[in-house]
Image (spheres, rainbow, N blue to C red):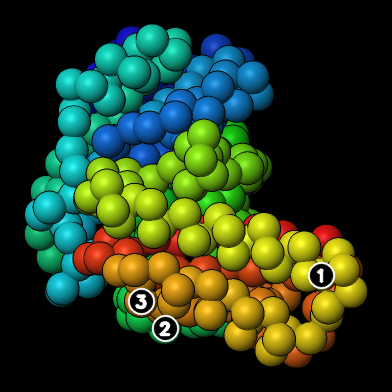
Amino acid sequence: MKIIETIGEMQRESDSMRMAGDIISVVPTMGFLHEGHLELMRVAKRHSDKVVMTLFVNPTQFGPAEDFEAYPRDTEGDLEKARSLGVDIVFMPNAIEMYQEGCQTTVRVERITQPLCGLSRPGHFDGVTTVVNKLFNCTKPHLAIFGQKDYQQLAAISRMVMDLNMDIKIIGVPTVREPDGLAMSSRNSYLNPEERQSALCLKKSLDLANKMFQEGTKDARIIKETIESLIKAHPFTRIDYVSLCDPMTLEEIEILKDETLLALAVRVGKTRLIDNCLIR
């Protein structure tokens, strides 16, 4: 496995792989890898000849009061996990390499980034789409692999690729969960044992909404109120949002359709967790 820290070297390596006829996939990560990340790499290996994992904690997607400095890091452990899965290249630039002095350009996806997490994290998705665009330019992939747990992020990146005519196929991978149902996240490490139990209310909410829909409830207001009551019954929780929305536009709906996105953001203690499912 090759470790590359500079943009120039990464671009030259990608050019060589492309000239050799290799299909390149990229798995962008901020490190502190868990089984969800590893599944993305397995999917990447099945779809390509060469797998590039990026390892970069991107400062521009963190707000002033968010956890950039405290974000969990385990570089050596991450590299060992990537190596064990047969990743070909880890691209791990630093912030100065990625954002040279005087950098003035950002990439903004408009409407789809405004609801849900966009309401409570202004500027977050500008940071996400800008850095992903830069990582695409550095790694020059044919495919890019993202998890569906970050549904809005996946939607914004897919929209960016479509709108800017990028010749990159985006593959979304279903959420990987702990045995008790909690969606895997690097931020789960912040939870103490009591908070960890309360955090299960997110998956319980998804299951309850699905059950209500299958039993005939289609009024979004009724489902939302029921879910909010379930979450509030658990200690340490504070709801950021419960949204039933169109899976393409992320606009709120009043009556559930044949396919509706249920998206949740809940603070458990000081930890902000997200989860989602498609109700069919």
> Residue at the location (30% across, 30% down)?
91
Q: Which residue is mark 2?
A: 119
Q: Is residue 14 above or below residue 118?
A: above
Mark 1 surroundings: few (<14), some (14-19) or many (≥20) residues within 10 A? some
Q: Which residue is mark 1?
A: 213
Q: Which residue is mark 3?
A: 238
Front: mark 2 or 1: 1
Instruction: Name which residue type carries label 3.
Output: Arg
Which is more toward the observer, 101 or 91?
91
Label 1 with label 3: CB-CB less than 8 Å = no
Q: Is residue 135 visible?
A: no
Q: Is residue 245 above or below residue 146?
A: below
Which image quadrant for residue 129? bottom left
Which is more toward the observer, 124 or 206?
206
Quarter the C terminus occupies: bottom right
Mark 1 or mark 3: name the one nearer the start of the chain. Answer: 1
